[in-house]
Image (cartoon, rainbow, N blue to C red):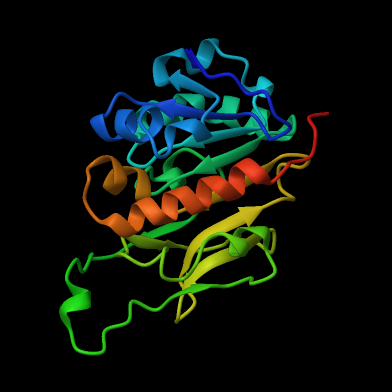
Amino acid sequence: MYIQENSGPNPVIAAIDAGFYFHHQSLREEPTAHFFDHIVYIRDVPLTDLTQFDTVIIPCRTNAFQLAPLSQQFVAYMKAGGRLVVMGETFPDRWLPDVNFTGMDTNFWWWLEAGADLGVQIVDKAHPMAAHVSKEAATWHLHGTLDPLNDNQKSLIATKDGGCLMFEDVTSYAPGRLVVTTLDPFFHHGSHFMPTTTVFLEAFLTWLSSDIPQQHG
């Protein structure tokens, strides 16, 4: 496990490293490396006390088959007060309860059409995330939508027709919380493909690092 010194009052953030090149680039190289206090290799997760971290991030495209055996550990972590952040293309509907995902054909070239607008919207302008993440930063392409299954899953980013791209649940796992998104900025930033995703990732991580979650109970 890689550990970076955190000398300030900000929440302690850990990220899961599944060994992909884009994880390495995003987690260990600037401009984003300084956001992570701990990096835990995915095979070390069962041996790691996650409750020492305020936030655990599962980066884009981490294999769902590797995550499925860890489901109960992640749920227990949230119920102990932790915040779990699940990024795009990890298919959390296969390894977390009460998450529903609908895939879609991805249009990588929508922006070439005259007057094109992907229709991404920041839903809750009063939410702390909205102070950092803009509509423009969250706009690159779509892989699918989340379908909130209960009133606890509050949409933060959505399409213009209401398809949820990110939700936060602060109730189901109280005192912990769950943030899930279909957006995949770690992959694109780490692949040096699509500069907008770097803007999003820095803004999103700034929110996570400045948002002090409830202390573990």
Q: In the image shown, does 179 or 191 lie closer to the viewer? A: 191
Picture quadrant of residue 214 = top right
Any part of residue 162 in sight: yes
Q: How many marks?
A: 0
Picture quadrant of residue 136 = bottom left
Give above or below for 180 relative to 125. Answer: above
Q: Position of residue 84 (x, y in %)?
A: 59, 38
Q: Position of residue 112 (x, y in %)?
A: 16, 78
Give above or below for 15 relative to 96. Answer: above
Which residue shows up at 33% across the image and 76% down it? 118
List the single residue furthest toward the bottom: 115
Q: Position of residue 147 (x, y in %)?
A: 50, 64
In the shown orientation, is residue 176 left or right of residue 109?
A: right
List the single residue furthest toward the top: 47
Which residue shows up at 60% across the image and 64% down it? 130
Give above or below for 169 relative to 69. Answer: below
Q: Position of residue 217 (x, y in %)?
A: 83, 28
Q: In the image shown, does 15 or 146 lie closer to the viewer? A: 15
In the shown orientation, is residue 57 left or right of residue 11?
A: left
Any part of residue 184 in sight: no
List the single residue furthest toward the right: 217
Which residue shows up at 70% across the image and 69% down it? 126
Give above or below for 20 relative to 32. Answer: above
In the shown orientation, is residue 19 left or right of residue 135?
A: left
